[in-house]
Image (cartoon, rainbow, N blue to C red):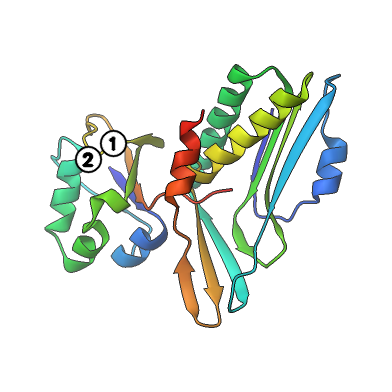
Amino acid sequence: MNVVYFAWVRERIGLPHEQITTDAATVAELVDELRAREARYEAAFADISALRVAVDQELSDFDASLKDVREVAFFPPMTGG
Amino acid sequence: MDIRVQQERFDAGAELNGFDPNGAGAVVTFTGLVRDVAGGLEEMLIEHYPAMTEKALREIAAEAEARWQLSNVLVIHRFGSLQPDEPIMMVATASRHRDAAFEAATFLMDYLKSRAPFWKKETTATGENWVESTVKDEEALKRW
């Protein structure tokens, strides 16, 4: 699936997006998998309460299923307006 | 409904004049500008999620249309590099009644603030800083 990062999440990980092959069943499992990878992911996902997630371009929750999902996006709370 | 996500600057006066109230008696508009910050703002960079942004704005505007009797809705939101005093975004609502037009415009603003996928980064002489959302922004949604 395509995993997308925005704002300081993108800066900490150092990538705007990447293709990830995963067996993670939920967003939370994907986060655990990413955190275990490298320090830069650990730095980005250290405090989940500071993050928001969109699944296939819809705002979602960390317990959301990843079944048939094509894109997951991680970002800080939005600051539009 | 007219929803625009764009990099280009817009003219709020021209947008108001071009906004068709479709016979309604009340039009309310709000324009958000880049605010200067202490230390002097050099740039505000607005990042967004292109695959999601327009869809999110349409859903928010559709929710406003479901809640109030609106004869037209306009939402413009910019992204990219902006300077102090430049317009960032604008909403316009038209309704037969002013209360509906005011309330719908406030609703749109509250939702755009924390449910539309934009992120702002300020650059001043002392460095860069991602603008953080506030508890107040989130609290503002509860009144709807």
Marked residue chain, label 2: A
Q: How many marks?
A: 2
Q: Is residue B124 left or right of residue A63?
A: right
Mark 1 element type? loop
Amino acid type of disc 2? Answer: Val
Residue A39, visible in the rendered structure: yes
| Percent x, y of residue B50 | 51, 46
Compared with A37, B24 (above or below) is: above
In front: B134, or A22? B134
Density class for disc 1 (Cα within 10 Å; few <14, some 14-19, many ≥20) is: some
Which residue is located at x 53 percent, y 28 percent?
B59
Mark 1 and mark 2 on one chain:
yes
N-term mark: 1 or 2 = 2
**Gap in Å between the C-alphas at discs 1 and 2?**
8 Å
User: Is label 1 in contact with label 2 (beta carbons under 8 Å)?
Assistant: yes
Quadrant in the rendering for residue A25:
top left
Label 2 residue SS: helix
Q: Residue under label 1, please give it.
A: A61
Left or right, B15 with reference to A7:
right
The mark closer to the camera, 1 or 2, is: 1
Q: Residue at x 16, y 57 (%)?
A: A35
Q: Which residue: 31% across, 48% down?
A: A3
Residue at point 56%, 24% (across, down): B63
Whole-percent x, y for residue B76 in the image: 67, 43
In the image, is residue B68 above or below residue A67? Answer: above
> Does the image show residue A19?
no
Name the residue that disc number 2 marks: A27
Q: Residue A59 at x, y = what percent?
A: 38, 36
